[in-house]
Image: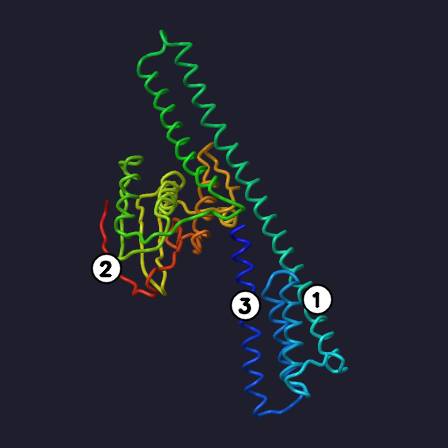
């Protein structure tokens, strides 16, 4: 109800502003260009614009009626009187109504088509996510069930080392499921295909520190070379979600970049944007998979080690922030994931940044 009231207020304000501007322009031009057909043409154009930028037919029809009255009262002899019986006034009214109806019809159809395309895209995304979820959950649960069954059924016969190995597999799969649940919690925040976020100014260095602390707990042996700007920098974001994106990208490199020796996390400021990069020197991304990375359909050869849903969630989060995300292969070998967010205070200079191995 509140959104509907806000939309009505916006459309009413736009209609009033457009008609007021047209009236002022017409009064100004009438002093210098006394052409009878000029003012009606301006109001017809105003009606067209109103019908184009507002929702439905009501505002365009209202603009048509107001325009006819304005032209009739202020710009048609006898001035300052209403005379709707004159043929030229009737013609102007009919033209404006025709413009309104045709333009509003086309606008409504265009918006409905856009809504259908958007809904189709959402359904495709949901289907991909469901497919990814079923794939990702089945394999670790099967492993957990099999390992627990083996320990329970052969407890007295299994060597302790074998039991520890099986329990380690259970723990590894449980950790994977926890990370999957974290991603799914983000998916549940998608309302009507749009992720509802609350941006707050977040200190960049604090965000990166938090990401590295959580990443080290999961991968204590993996070093990350970090490069961030030297200056104090805040970026408007939902810090929890962007932290999740960075952790997903770092984990993706560890799990899928075969032969990786180095892992980089970089942040730079260019063109009013904070640009985040996660780069590795591993095996890179197969060319035929590059186009499917962010749609939830990226199957992995190693069973449940499946990157699709995590990257799909990343793309949804970044898009909800008004940013973008890309992936590419490095010339030297390895993969580069890049996403960008708008800075709070406009353009900032690119910085060489702090650099170190963590």
Taking depth in this image into account, of 90 and 247 the one nearest to the observer is 90
Q: Which residue is mark 1?
A: 101
Q: Which mark is residue 231?
A: 2
Q: Residue at the spot x=29%, y=48% of the render? A: 207
Q: Is residue 228 above or below residue 168?
A: below
Q: Which residue is mark 3?
A: 14
Instruction: Report the label total.
Output: 3
Image coords of residue 344 (percent x, y): 34, 60
Q: Is residue 46 above or below residue 28?
A: above
Q: Earlier in the sequence, mark 1 or mark 3?
A: 3
Q: Residues within 10 Å of mark 2 (few under 14, many from 20)?
A: few
Image coords of residue 169 (percent x, y): 37, 24
Q: Is residue 110 left or right of residue 334?
A: right
Secondary-structure class at tag 3:
helix
Q: Residue at the spot x=56%, y=65% of the render? A: 12
Of all residues, the one furthest to the top in this rendering is 156
Labelled pair 1, 3 in contact (Cβ < 8 Å): no
Secondary-structure class at tag 2:
loop
Q: Is residue 294 left or right of residue 90?
A: left
């Amino acid at each position: 109800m509140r959104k509907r009231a806000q939309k009505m207020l916006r459309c009413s304000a736009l209609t009033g502003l457009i008609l007021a501007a047209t009236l002022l322009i017409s009064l100004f031009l009438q002093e210098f260009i006394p052409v009878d057909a000029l003012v009606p043409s301006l109001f017809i154009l105003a009606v067209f614009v109103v019908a184009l930028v507002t929702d439905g037919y009501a505002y365009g029809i209202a603009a048509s009626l107001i325009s006819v009255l304005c032209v009739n009262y202020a710009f048609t002899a006898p001035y300052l009187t209403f005379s709707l019986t004159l043929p030229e006034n009737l013609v102007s009214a009919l033209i404006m109504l025709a413009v309104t109806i045709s333009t509003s019809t086309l606008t409504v159809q265009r918006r409905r088509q856009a809504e259908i395309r958007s809904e189709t895209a959402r359904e495709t995304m949901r289907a991909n996510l469901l497919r990814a979820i079923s794939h990702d959950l089945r394999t670790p649960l099967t492993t957990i069930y099999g390992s627990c069954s083996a320990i329970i059924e052969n407890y007295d016969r299994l060597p302790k080392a074998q039991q520890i190995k099986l329990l380690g597999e259970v723990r590894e799969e449980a950790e994977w499921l926890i990370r999957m649940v974290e991603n799914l919690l983000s998916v549940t925040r998608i309302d009507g295909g749009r992720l509802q976020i609350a941006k707050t100014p977040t200190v960049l260095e604090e965000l990166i520190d938090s990401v590295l602390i959580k990443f080290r707990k999961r991968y204590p042996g993996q070093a990350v070379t970090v490069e961030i700007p030297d200056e104090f920098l805040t970026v408007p974001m939902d810090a929890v979600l962007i932290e999740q994106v960075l952790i997903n990208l770092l984990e993706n490199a560890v799990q899928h970049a075969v032969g990786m020796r180095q892992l980089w996390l970089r942040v730079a400021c260019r063109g009013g944007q904070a640009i985040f990069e996660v780069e590795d020197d591993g095996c890179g991304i197969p060319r035929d998979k590059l186009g499917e990375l962010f749609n939830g359909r990226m199957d992995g050869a190693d069973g449940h080690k499946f990157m699709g849903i995590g990257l799909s969630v990343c793309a949804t989060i970044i898009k909800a922030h008004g940013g973008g995300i890309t992936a590419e292969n490095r010339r030297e070998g390895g993969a580069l994931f890049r996403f960008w967010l708008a800075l709070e205070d406009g353009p900032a200079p690119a910085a060489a940044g702090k650099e170190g191995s963590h």
